[in-house]
Amino acid sequence: MEKKLISVIIPMYNASRFIKQCVKSILKQTYKNFELLIINDGSTDNSLDICSRFKDQRIKIINQKNAGCEYARLTGIKQSKGEYICFVDADDWIAKDYLEKLIAPAEKYDVDVVCINSYKALGRYGLIRLKGQQNSFLKEGLLTIDALSDFYNIYVYDRVFTNNVWGKLYKATIIDVDSISPAGIFYGEDLLFNLRVTYNIKSCYLVDEYKYYYRYGGYTIAEYHKYWEDNIRLYYAIKEFALENHNRELQNIISYSLISIFHWMIIYLCKFLHLPKSGVRDFISSVLNSEIYTEMDTTCNFNPMFLEAIQHKDIDAIMKIIESDVKSNILSYRHKIFRYLFRILN
């Protein structure tokens, strides 16, 4: 029986520090029938030179002008020939039996998606185990259309699997290339991709083994304006998707998340970036006087005082609420917001 071809796609931009380890881990796979598409997204370092040194006929390097990870992945999908597709980030790596563990249940049960667990690599601080599924009650095994019917909102906390595109094997036929319209964002692009394939998933298999190594960058959101702008674009993209699919629940979730992220952003500027109060006030003012303000649902289930302050565009009241939240709940709140962001954006 001929083995199915897997297309492994790596979007690459200035990844010279890690791309060699990444590619090596793929070439060492026990499952041999794959093609490796490396999409060089306009790298300005020596990433391309490093990849060019590998002499393996399964490798295909595609060069394009810098356009972002969304576009690089889309290029890879369009150029792929495999019956299955998986994504690996250029700074990550995989266990030698990663593809084998994914393809086995895919072929046995003819499922649309296979999910596997991963390690979060913290450099010298070691590894943290990350479950491939969000719902802790789900164990390894097959999920058919009946079981999945309660989980069609991948965005919610009870979703079947995490929003990241790595750690998964997708059947190529469930990815509708024509429906993928990149939103031009950096934060949250995985979420958009998975939302678009959600309604095409009729079956899923969960593998309870840890085979993907996700390198945690430990970034801080120093360019907070870009982060906020990305979230706005993400909001509109998800809203459009929700309206197209008549998904009222998803609309309610993103309305709440918009308020929540606005609140979180102000907390972050005050407590973690230590931005001067004048700078924080300027940020709040810019949001309250922008188009996104009209999208903020002040009737959602959030802090009523904060919602009232937003409704009246009362910057003084917002600052007082934030200062109170920082003083009284910062330790527990910090844990919650980072956990929230990790689940939504990763």
Image: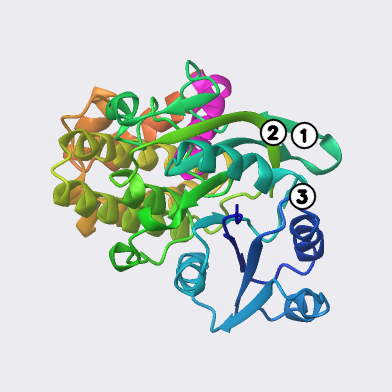
Q: Position of residue 281 (x, y in %)?
A: 38, 49
The image quarter in which residue 304 lies: top left
Mark 1, Cα crowd under 10 Å, few <14 / some 14-19 / many 20+, is: some
Q: Is 336 in the magenta? A: yes
Marks 2 and 1, how far apart at CA: 11 Å
* SS category of the residue bearing label 2: strand
Badge 2 is on which residue?
210
Residue 166 percent across, percent down from the top left: 57, 49
Crowd rating for badge 3 (residues with CA inside 10 Å; few <14, some 14–19, many 20+): some
Predominant SS along the magenta part: helix
The kind of secondary structure element at disc 1 is strand
Relative to 90, is 246 above or below? above
Seen from the viewer's position, the closer of residues 115 and 263 is 115
Q: Residue furthest top?
A: 137
Query: Which kind of residue does numbered mark 2 sit on?
Result: Tyr
User: From the viewer's perspective, is the residue at label 3 or at label 1 nearer?
Assistant: 3
Secondary structure beneath label 3: loop
Q: Which residues are magenta?
A: 329-346
Q: Earlier in the sequence, mark 3 or mark 2?
A: 3
Residue positioned 38% across, 59% down in the render: 229
Task: Confirm whether the magenta stretch covers residue 61.
Answer: no
Q: Rounded to the nearest whole Å, what is the CA distance between mark 3 and mark 2?
A: 16 Å
- Residue found 52% across the figure and 57% down from its top: 85
Q: Residues within 10 Å of mark 2 (few under 14, many from 20)?
A: some
Mark 2 or mark 1, which has the lower sequence index?
1
Q: Which mark is residue 127?
A: 1
Amino acid type shown at disc 3 = Thr
Which residue in the structure is indicated by mark 3? 30
Amino acid at pointer 1: Leu
